[in-house]
Amino acid sequence: MTAITAAGREGDAGAEVVRILHPLRIPEGATGEGTERGPYIGVAVDTETTGLDWRSGRVIELALRRFRYDRSGVITHIDRAYEWREDPGEPLSPEVSALTGLTDSDLAGQEIDVDAATRLLNSASFVVAHNSAFDRPWIEARLDRVQDLAWVCSMSQVDWRSRGFDGRVLGYLLVQNGFYHCGHRASADVDALIQLLRHRDRDGRTALNELISTGSKPGWIVRACGAHFDSKDLLRTRGYRWAADAKVWWREVSDEELPAERSWLAANVYSAAARPAALGPDLERVTANTRFR
């Protein structure tokens, strides 16, 4: 087995720390974890696309891999990997080719197996991607019969920092977990995602267990409609993100957080001194079936 060593310095004493990275290989079949075959099914997904906007771009690669897990969120079995490429009908830009490693000849005449992909997605309790806000719209635009599935996101719904990781980028998380892979290819990123979901914290709780617990709870999308331009720094510090298409600052909060959030907005964004162009925020109820659209 080939391994990569990465050396660094840690602490005032300058003690050398060496991390050995192993190539990530996830075989099909039992993982050796858990006490029995898990009765629940999840499916990890990743897409490569011709751009960032699903309304004008095309999916050029789709990878799916199902896994079984038990009541404790332990992955007990992993299915075979599925990957399809698709000809977008136009040449790839140099930037997309450089990012994905795909060329026009790789895609020529290729097509996603829509029936197989739809069947696999609908067979699972939930769909997970490492940036579901990106992948979900692309997949739903390409596949007709997957519009109402439950989605969770391993990037935003797992507290990686409390698990001892820095950042949330998939490849970086994987390296900190002791592995490396050929990133920016859909199938490689799916395997990296599954490996990270198997991570256990100090109490033995898997990242998948945390993800399911967080992702299954409903919440509220709070949009600070009519917020004055001068409120942007306050909103950003509060955790709001700018939605360029809707031209509004927004964030998601839980049921328990909503009263405090409304009070904060009333005092800081919708007071007369803040010069808002609306009386209050727009609220939208979200669940795992509607989130990340």
Image: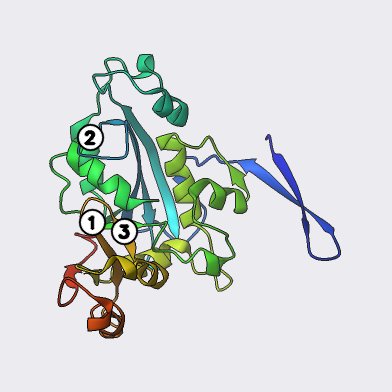
Which tag, 2 or 3, sits closer to the chain's start?
2
Q: Looking at the picture, tell me which residue is in the foreground, 64 or 86.
A: 86
Examine the image and state in which quarter residue 112 appears: top left
Query: For the view shown, which residue lies furthest in the right direction?
Result: 13
Q: Please identify the quadrant where the N terminus is shown.
A: top right
Residue at the image position 30 percent from the left and 73 percent from the top: 253
Label 2 close to label 3 by CB (< 8 Å): no
Give the image quarter of residue 204: bottom right
Q: Position of residue 88 (x, y in %)?
A: 26, 23
Q: Which residue is mark 1?
A: 247
- Vertical placement of residue 195 versus 11, above or below: above
Q: Amino acid at mark 1?
A: Lys
- Tell me if label 2 and label 1 are in contact, CB under 8 Å: no
SS of the residue at dot 1?
loop
Mark 2 and mark 3: span between their CA atoms?
Answer: 36 Å
Q: Earlier in the sequence, mark 2 or mark 1?
A: 2
Q: Which mark is residue 116?
A: 2
Q: Which residue is mark 3?
A: 242
Q: Is residue 35 visible?
A: no
Kind of residue indicated by mark 2: Ala
Q: Is residue 87 above or below residue 130?
A: above
7 with respect to 95 (left or right)? right
In this rendering, position of residue 16 left or right of residue 78: right
Identity of the amino acid at label 3? Trp
Residue at 21% of width from left, 34% of height from top? 56
Real-space Cα separation, disc 2 to disc 1, in angstroms: 37 Å
Q: Residues within 10 Å of mark 1 (few under 14, many from 20)?
A: few
Nearer-N-terminus badge (3/1): 3
Residue 128, horizontal then vertical, whole percent: 34, 52
Residue 148: where, in percent of width, then height? 16, 54
